[in-house]
Amino acid sequence: YLRKVEVKPDPYTMQEALDGPDREEWKEAGDKEIQALDENKTWKIVPAPKDRKIVDSRWLLKTKYDGNGNIERRKARLVARGFSQEEGVDFHETFAPVVRLGSVRALLALVVKKRLICHQMDVSSAFLNGDLEEEIYMKQPPGYEVEDPTGQERKMVCLLQKSIYGLRQSPRCWHKKLKGFLKTLDFTSLRSEEGIYFSKSRKVIISVYVDDVIVTGTTLEAVQEVKKAMSTRFKMHDLGPLHFILGIRVMQNSDGSLTLDQENYTENILIKFGMDKCKPVCTPGEKRSLKIDDGTALVNQTMYQSAIGSLLYLSLGTRPDITYAVGTAARYAKEPRQGHWNSVKRIMRYLRGTSDYKLHYKPSSGPMNLVGFSDSDYGSDVND
């Protein structure tokens, strides 16, 4: 069931986490991360060189929730503060593609139409698998510093051997490593979508969003074979049939249909912006048109842009019914006024009454026909 609770902010530093009520869980999460880094031989502890910039490091602490909003685990990740890197010295190319939400939905529609087997996997510490070409020195992880083994008072730092989260080039290093491995398994990426790989010989399609992997195939045996091959090369978690991906809850029904929803994500948006107890409305948009300057006072730009970003992700995921209203409100993100903010709140009031709406994909017989729908602005044409 959906657990509607307010999400508490995570600790900002490891020391703050260790001083809090969940200190044991955070300590265990930190120890697990350091163990993974050591096992992967991510760095060597060396004296700090005098002629090189040392990249800072910090902990990112996050509470992971399942598809129903229940706490799943505490996650501690050590990251480099890559903003201090210098282009041409510490890094070169950085771009790395990921699958788009629209492509994931298209893949799931194909799963229903062709009645494919659909499983998911999670790569453990994906970026640590990437091979680092540049020479980069990083400060030791806070709370896990190692003294100079010679007894001298030299400052010790990490000489990175593998890519690590936070470095500018880490996503590209991981993408390059994964793509090269999948090529050995006879997988080719789509020209139109680099985040999706297919193998004609295996009859399997793989979708990749950083470390979240969807494996679909015509038979369970084919899917299991690919999962086993990937688990042999990388440390991965086999999560079984697809049930939760990129904040979207997926229900695979016995009749072959799929149901997608972001009800928990929607609830968190409403709580974040203080709209969880608001009065619902029946449409996301109003009849009146918005203006750049409607005469009302300016509102906090950061708050407005944060709300727009959250709603855009929701509309791209499972709520196309708010796309028009969100797109209209997004036009005024540079200098938002109270009138624009009221339109954003109206979208949230609409979500308050429709948070349980779902996308439903059901199998059908016959050829796969393409059906198109136009955006609906809910009759806002004032001349009509």
Image (cartoon, grey):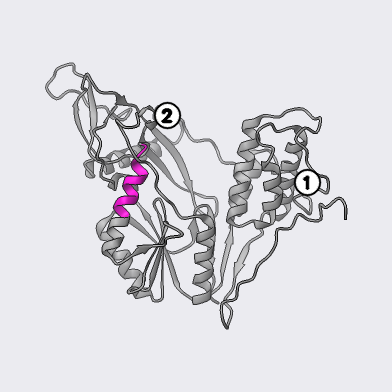
Which element carries disc 2, helix, strand or loop? Answer: loop
- Residue 192 counted in the magenta span: no
Q: Residue furthest right?
A: 384
Q: Give the image location of residue 10, x and y in percent.
A: 49, 35
Q: Give the image location of residue 378, x and y in percent.
A: 78, 56
Foreground: 206 or 192?
Answer: 192
Foreground: 27 or 135?
Answer: 135
Q: Give the residue pinned by disc 2.
A: 13
Q: Residue furthest bottom?
A: 366
> Where is 289 relative to 238, above or below?
above
Which element carries disc 1, helix, strand or loop? Answer: loop
Q: Give the image location of residue 299, x and y in percent.
A: 71, 29
Q: Residue at x 54, y 58 (%)?
A: 102
Q: Is residue 142 left or right of residue 343?
A: left
| Label 1 Cα neighbours within 10 Å, binned few <14 / some 14-19 / many ≥20 | few
Residue 125 visible to the viewer: no
- Residue 175 counted in the magenta span: yes
Image quadrant holding the N terminus, namely: bottom right
Q: Amino acid at mark 1?
A: Lys
Foreground: 204 or 240?
Answer: 204
Q: Amino acid at mark 2?
A: Thr
Main secondary structure of the magenta stretch: helix
Q: Give the residue pinned by disc 1.
A: 279
> Where is 76 relative to 368, above or below?
above
Q: CA distance from mark 1 to mark 2?
A: 38 Å
Residue 229 visible to the viewer: yes
Q: Give the image location of residue 355, x and y in percent.
A: 67, 54
Which region shows up in magenta? 168-178
Total marks drawn? Answer: 2
